Image: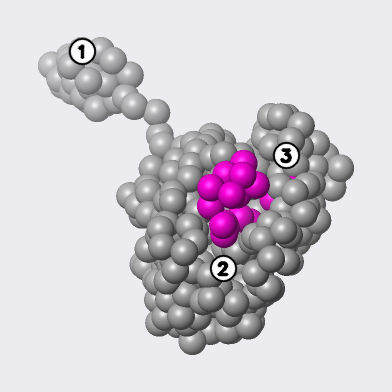
């Protein structure tokens, strides 16, 4: 009996030691903590290299934080080609976008013209792994402008009128405009306007100054930029709808689209945002030199979203 008892004790000790060994490594370190649940993993909100995108990125990021989500920002990434690559590679999770231009990025031959047509066509053209959430009533169109003096002198009111002055004129816009479907290629193919030169600009302020000084004759801006009203620029009509409707929309990864809290926070911002809001927010940053994060935070508090 004593031998059997001793054998049982040894067996029990061995079992216990084996159990301890299964919960530790040979160096005595604790095993790695379990990964965070999906809704606690870091969400990275990116933005493009212009004021409005950075404001929108802050609106999205702070609204998500208000829901208790783990969020960081990666502002001023660059143009569409750069931030779309970042989104598909997974270094960012969300980026503010615009419906019409995003559609043309993936389908240059799209026949969509109206807001509804654009929003219906867009989801089908996105690459695997990316989705758009609900678009906002807030919109920001690319627009071609001239000074009032130049418009009066040359009888220019629409893009169709550019044909008569383009051969001796310089067009100014962001560098990426040169190859966009609604840039010089579209002006030539749709309106028969071929400019003498395209001059790229990184700074809207410098572009505006050169337009006022006559160094360029036509320029593109966004309709929500206060510089248009401040300088009394004439916005040229687009009778052939070369520039598609540009409603603000979050472009997100599948993980974000499937996260109920994140989706609700983003779509609440989308529903509350107006074009007038965008114009006012941009003005605070560009003219008053307020911080985009502060500007976004003030708006979210005003709307009860943070």
Q: Is residue 254 visible?
A: no
Mark 3 is surrounded, within 10 Å at the Cα level, by few (under 14), some (14 to 19) or many (20 or more) other residues, namely: many
Residue beneath label 3, please?
296
Q: Is 250 in the magenta? A: no
Q: Are marks 3 and 1 in contact (CB under 8 Å)?
A: no
Q: Is residue 189 visible?
A: yes
Secondary structure of the residue carrying tag 2 is: helix
Q: Quadrant of the C terminus?
A: top right
Tag of residue 227: none
Q: Please name the residue shown 34% across and 27% down the image.
A: 32
Residue beneath label 1, please?
27
Q: Residue furthest bottom?
A: 111
Q: Mark 3 and mark 1: span between their CA atoms?
A: 49 Å
Specify start and end residues of the magenta stretch as a single range. 209-226
> Which of the two residues, 47 or 111, is positioned nearer the viewer here?
111
Q: Please name the residue shown 28% across and 15% down the image.
A: 29
Q: Position of residue 161 (x, y in %)?
A: 60, 77
Q: Mark 2 and mark 1: span between their CA atoms?
A: 55 Å
Q: Position of residue 290 (x, y in %)?
A: 73, 30
Q: Considering only order in the chain, which callout, 3 or 2, is on the residue closer to the N terminus? A: 2
Q: Please name the residue shown 77% across and 54% down the image.
A: 232
Q: Mark 2 and mark 3: span between their CA atoms?
A: 22 Å
Q: Residue furthest front?
A: 153
Q: Position of residue 252 (x, y in %)?
A: 50, 57
> Which of the two residues, 294 or 26, is positioned nearer the viewer here?
294
Image side of residue 193 versus residue 144, left or right: left
Secondary structure of the residue carrying tag 3 is: helix
Q: Considering only order in the chain, which callout, 1 or 3, is on the residue closer to the N terminus? A: 1
Secondary structure of the residue carrying tag 1 is: loop
> Which of the two residues, 109 or 170, is positioned nearer the viewer here?
170
């Amino acid at each position: 009996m004593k031998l059997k008892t001793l054998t049982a004790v040894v067996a029990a000790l061995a079992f216990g030691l084996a159990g301890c060994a299964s919960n530790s490594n040979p160096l005595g370190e604790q095993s790695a903590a379990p990964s965070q649940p999906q809704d606690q993993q870091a969400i990275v909100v990116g933005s493009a290299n212009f004021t409005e995108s950075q404001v929108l990125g802050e609106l999205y990021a702070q609204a998500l934080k208000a829901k208790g989500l783990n969020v960081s920002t990666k502002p001023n990434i660059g143009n569409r080609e750069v931030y779309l690559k970042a989104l598909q590679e997974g270094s960012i999770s969300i980026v503010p976008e615009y419906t019409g231009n995003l559609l043309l990025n993936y389908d240059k031959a799209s026949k969509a013209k109206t807001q509804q047509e654009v929003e219906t066509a867009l989801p089908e053209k996105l690459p695997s792994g990316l989705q758009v959430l609900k678009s906002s009533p807030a919109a920001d169109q690319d627009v071609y402008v001239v000074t009032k003096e130049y418009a009066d002198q040359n009888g220019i009111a629409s893009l169709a009128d550019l044909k008569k002055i383009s051969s001796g004129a310089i067009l100014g816009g962001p560098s990426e405009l040169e190859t966009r479907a609604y840039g010089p290629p579209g002006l030539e193919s749709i309106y028969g306007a071929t400019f003498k030169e395209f001059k790229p600009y990184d700074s809207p302020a410098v572009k505006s100054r050169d337009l006022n000084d006559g160094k360029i004759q036509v320029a593109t801006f966004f309709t929500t930029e206060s510089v248009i009203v401040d300088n009394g620029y004439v916005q040229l009509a687009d009778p052939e709808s070369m520039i598609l409707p540009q409603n603000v929309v979050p472009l997100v990864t599948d993980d974000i689209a499937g996260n109920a809290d994140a989706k609700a926070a983003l779509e609440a911002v989308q529903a509350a945002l107006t074009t007038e809001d965008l114009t006012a927010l941009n003005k605070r940053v560009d003219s008053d030199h307020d911080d985009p994060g502060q500007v976004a935070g003030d708006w979210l508090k005003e709307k009860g979203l943070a």
